[in-house]
């Protein structure tokens, strides 16, 4: 596993940086893969200049691996369809081949019958759109009890029932995998891995929130190293993307040293 080839930065790691400075951070860290987001308060995603983005990508030798994200993707309707079409169009213009698909997380549709029904419907509707644009859909189960998709296994089962299932893969998020208490790791279906660590040992599992997510070090309680090692040992060769949501990380003027330290720690344990 090489830092150049396998690590990625999700823009949530530095939400206060504009696009050029986020790209520069990745370049300075010698990380060539990044995820951009359409939910950052300081960036008007709809007004981004794709031509300028491509200039920076070429200058800094970067690759955008995903746009994060189509929210509430499994609550399918015309608004969701229009948003997906717009995201796919944007992705093609910046040579990005993936869009993260995040489920509804409001406590609705959490009984098994309801959540499977809306997931099945959404995948069937989204599949031909992704296929027509040749874009990959990265389905990201959320481990929260309020999530309408908690388990990767249910996504895998539904993918076996639709056309163009090859356009979908899973996001294995180490944080959400821990919260869902889902032991099975579906390496063959995994297209992207989001990594973050939690260090507060006083937290009960039901009290762990996005805000708890930092970078991975020796104090991590999520068992990131075991998860990452299992994926690598089973043949996973795609990206591990840093996705911390903690204000402690967001408020750093320069997180470079922490990111380098986390990378070195992870590599030392593999």
Image (cartoon, rainbow, N blue to C red):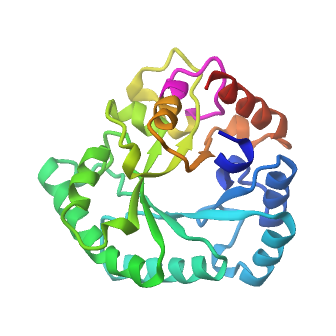
Asked where in the image residue 251 lies, by quadrant, the reply is: top right
Q: Position of residue 263 (x, y in %)?
A: 72, 34
Q: Please give the name of the residue rendered at 75% of the width and 56% of the height, measured from the top-left corner.
A: 32
Residue 153 shown left or right of residue 68 in the figure: left
Image spot of residue 196 (x, y percent): 58, 36
Would residue 210 appear left or right of 104 to someone viewing this image? Answer: right
Indicate whether 181 appears above or below 64. Answer: above
Look at 45% across and 77% down and name the residue there.
Answer: 84
Name, please, the residue furthest toward the left.
113
Q: Is residue 185 above or below residue 31?
A: above
Residue 74: which quarter of the image? Answer: bottom left
The extreme top residue here reads 202
Is 219 a magenta residue?
yes
- Please report the residue visible at 29 percent of the width from the left and 48 percent of the height from the top: 107
Residue 113: % across, % down: 12, 53
Q: Which residues are drawn in magenta? A: 212-226
In the displayed structure image, the side of residue 263 where residue 134 appears, left or right: left
- Spot occupied by residue 115 in the image (x, y as percentages of width and height): 21, 55
């Amino acid at each position: 596993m090489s830092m150049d080839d396998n690590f990625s930065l999700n823009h949530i790691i530095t939400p206060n940086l504009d696009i050029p400075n986020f790209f520069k951070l990745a370049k300075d860290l010698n990380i060539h893969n990044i995820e951009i987001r359409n939910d950052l308060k300081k960036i008007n995603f709809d007004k981004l200049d794709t031509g300028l983005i491509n200039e920076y990508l070429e200058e800094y030798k970067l690759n955008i691996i995903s746009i994060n994200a189509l929210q509430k993707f499994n609550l399918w309707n015309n608004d969701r369809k229009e948003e997906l079409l717009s995201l796919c169009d944007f992705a093609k213009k910046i040579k990005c081949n993936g869009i993260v698909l995040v489920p509804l997380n409001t406590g609705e549709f959490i009984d098994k019958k309801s959540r499977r029904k809306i997931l099945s419907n959404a995948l069937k509707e989204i599949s031909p759109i992704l296929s027509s644009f040749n874009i990959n859909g990265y389905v990201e189960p959320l481990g929260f009890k309020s999530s309408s998709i908690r388990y990767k296994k249910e996504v895998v089962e539904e993918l076996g029932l639709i056309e163009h299932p090859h356009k979908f893969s899973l996001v294995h998020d180490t944080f959400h995998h821990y919260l869902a208490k889902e032991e099975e790791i579906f390496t063959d279906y995994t297209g992207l891995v989001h990594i973050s660590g939690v260090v507060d040992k006083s937290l009960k599992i039901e009290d762990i929130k996005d805000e708890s997510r930092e970078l991975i070090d020796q104090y991590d309680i999520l068992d990131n190293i075991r998860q990452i090692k299992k994926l690598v040992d089973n043949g996973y060769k795609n990206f591990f993307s840093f996705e911390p949501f903690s204000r402690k990380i967001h408020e750093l003027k320069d997180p470079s040293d922490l990111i380098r330290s986390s990378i070195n720690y992870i590599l030392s344990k593999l």
